[in-house]
Amino acid sequence: MSLVTNRGRMQGFIILDYLPRAMEAIEQLMGWVASGDIVYAVDMAEGFDNIPATIQRLYTGQNFGKQLLKIADPE
């Protein structure tokens, strides 16, 4: 309702529209990571038994960065 009362505008985009420029984006992003302008973190949990707790971390905001769950090592 806030968009309506404030006469806001919302616009999305479909990433497939920009697929031809994907390499351009990847190169730019890699440069930002290398220079430290973008910093990323990975929050890794392990084990099948940790599935519920790991999902719960997403909903409670306890995770930091990208939340990953390693179920098992590949054979």
Image (spheres, rainbow, N blue to C red):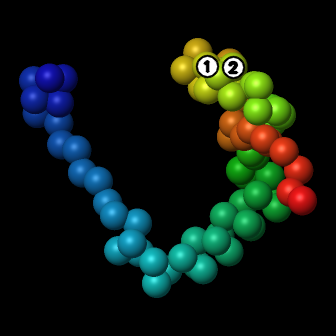
**Residue that extends furthest to the bottom in the rendered view of this protein:** 20
- For the N terminus, the quadrant is top left
The amino acid at mark 1 is Gln
Q: What element does badge 1 sit on?
A: helix
At x 74%, y 45%, the residue is: 40
Give x and y (percent) for residue 20. Answer: 46, 84
User: How many callouts does the rendering have?
Assistant: 2
Circles 2 and 1 in contact, beta carbons < 8 Å = yes
Q: What element does badge 2 sit on?
A: helix
- Tell me: 64 left or right of 12: right
> Is any part of residue 53 visible from this angle?
yes
Give x and y (percent) for residue 70. Answer: 79, 42
Give x and y (percent) for residue 48. Answer: 76, 32
The dot on residue 53 is 2
**Residue that extends furthest to the top in the rendered view of this protein:** 60
At x 22%, y 44%, the residue is: 10
The dot on residue 56 is 1
- For the C terminus, the quadrant is bottom right
Q: How crowded is mark 1: few (under 14 residues within 10 Å), some or many (20 or more)?
A: few
Q: Which of 64 and 74 is in front in this view?
A: 74
**Hey, which quadrant is residue 68 in on the image?**
top right
The amino acid at mark 2 is Ala
